[in-house]
Amino acid sequence: MTQKKPETSERWPRLFSGIRPVNRAGALRDALAGVTLAAMNVPQVLGYTRIAGTPVITGLYTLLLPLVAFAAFGSSRYLVVAADSATAAILAGRLSQMAPVASEHYVALAGMVALLTAGCLLLARLFKLGFLADFLSQTVLVGFLTGVGFQVGIAMLGEMLGVPVHSNRTVGQLAQVVRGLSQVHVLTLCLAGAVVTIVLAVRRIAPRLPGPLFAVVGGIAASAAFDFSGHGISIIERVTGGLPPIGLPAVGWNEIPPLLPVAASCFLMIVAQSAATARVYASRDRQALDENSDLVGLSAANAAAALSGTFVVNGSPTQTAMVESSGGHSQLAHLVTAAVVALVLLFLTGPLHYLPRCVLGAVVFTIAVELVDVRGLRDIRRESPGEFRLALFTAAVVVVIGVEQGILLAIVLSLLRHLRHSYRPHTAVLVEDDGQWRATPAVPGALSEPGLVIFQFGADLFYANAGRFVEDVRDLVEGAATVNWLVLDAGAITSIDYSAARVLRDLQRELIRRRITLVLVHAEASLLADLYRHRLGDVIGTDHIFDTLREALAAIRGQRVHAVSVPDPTARK
């Protein structure tokens, strides 16, 4: 007897499923990618602390225990879960009104938001809300990541040009860069340009080599040797080392209610952005992905962030792109990153001080370039202009308004587009041509043959499109001189709801008054069950429901055939 394998959606994740299986070659490749991610990401997460309003050291903490927690419980082999600009901005918007920025109490409030967010993500797993990711179409994903690429690239321009930029909005950042072009620092620009050239050249000529790692290490070494800061090239501030303290955030019960809306906003951002990013890379590399397992991993990562004294973490498209571009193919790369960060915290915070900001900005800028999916946009435009406009709109909203609003609005637009298709489905009248039935436009008065209309309706019947269905039928029968038979090809109709059933009942009575007989063909079992539940089987007549069009036409033309009876799902066996 073979044991039945449990469904993925019903089981909780196995530990480290985003790593296994592993082999020696893959482990070496992931280890190198993990070192590269650490080299590129350590300075970047320090910048996120400025957005979040927390001390600089907390940025490094986001690359320690949260990475390990997601690697243990998540399913995505690529998704990097760490500090993120969107959730950092959501956090700062509320906490700055509750405590002094970067104070001990502020950090405690940030940790409590992370803990509450972890609870929201765990509840989402319990209620199996991972399906929300299914509403992110490939069009939305391409537009989303393209928008993120522009957003990140524009955000790096200030550091690459040596121009001061203080806005957190992409449009504001671009405006400040344009206004500050007269203040461009030539040495900073030359260094950033050299890094971009080297990284892109290495990626093109020898994509397996870690070009960003060479740039970061070379930038630190050159800065220390030639005193870049003394020549006006900005470097990052000093970082105090040491592992994070472990414990619950010291927050009173009365302070938790104001934090709930902040946690809810972070939850929405995390689910949307992490799902979008994980789906892109799983699809691109044909990897299995379990969104519900990822919810557990994201919950564990945020709980680890709360316990280690840092702020909310999120799935980052930029950092995930860093890992993939460096050759990483599993969460082992992220464990290596966490190990490197632990060493940095203990022993190597000193050399980081020499890293030029423009080098970091240039490396991240090259990642942003890769996120702009020109080929994907070109394919969408060629095959579906309507979806191309949706992708561009998604990208524009991400750039102009923000990541959270962009992805959520894109989901809504995708659903509305699908609803519009269901509301106004394809319709046709079938006409026989050389022994074959072909679809012709369902214009008023169209006939399949004298006295007969074979009508196709391309969607389920529900409350919103039932009225349009009736209008289409009326136009057909009223526009023709004589109609005796109306054959409804129900092959695309899998269900009918209560409202549509009432409309169909009224239509059948109207057709009887007009001396028109309604016949159904190609009705699936689910539709037949709905017809019986709504007591339409007797109204239409079980002898007017057929498996095939051939049988229906044979009956219409006077031949004896066997009609399909409508099953009674409540009948005793």
Image (cartoon, rainbow, N blue to C red):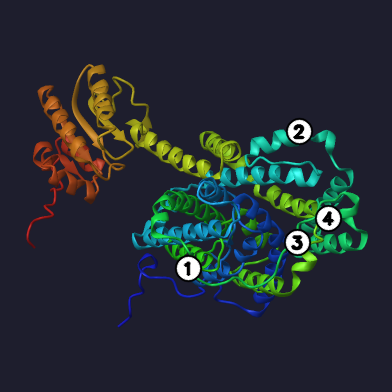
Q: Earlier in the sequence, mark 2 or mark 4?
A: 2
Question: Circle 1 is placed at which residue position?
Answer: 248
Q: Secondary structure at mark 3?
A: loop
Can residue 433 be seen?
no
Q: Nearer the viewer, mark 4 or mark 1?
A: 1
Disc 2 from disc 4: Cα separation: 26 Å
Which circle, 3 or 2, is nearer the viewer? 3
Foreground disc of the pair 2, 4: 2
Q: Find disc 3 in the rendering and name its residue.
A: 238
359 vs 551, left or right, is: right
Q: Amino acid type of disc 4?
A: Ile
Q: Work out how far the residue at label 1 is from the one at label 2, CA to CA, in angstroms.
A: 45 Å
Which quadrant does the C terminus fall into? bottom left
**First-in-chain label (4 vs 1):** 4
N-term-proximal mark, 4 vs 3: 4
Residue placed under numbered mark 2 in the picture: 178
Q: Earlier in the sequence, mark 1 or mark 2?
A: 2
Q: Residues within 10 Å of mark 1 (few under 14, many from 20)?
A: some
Q: Which residue is mark 4?
A: 198
From the viewer's perspective, is residue 472 above or below residue 60?
A: above
Mark 4, secondary structure of its residue: helix
Distance CA(mark 4)–CA(mark 3) = 27 Å
Left or right position of 135 against 1: right
Q: Earlier in the sequence, mark 3 or mark 1?
A: 3
Label 4, label 1: how many angstroms apart (C-alpha)? 45 Å
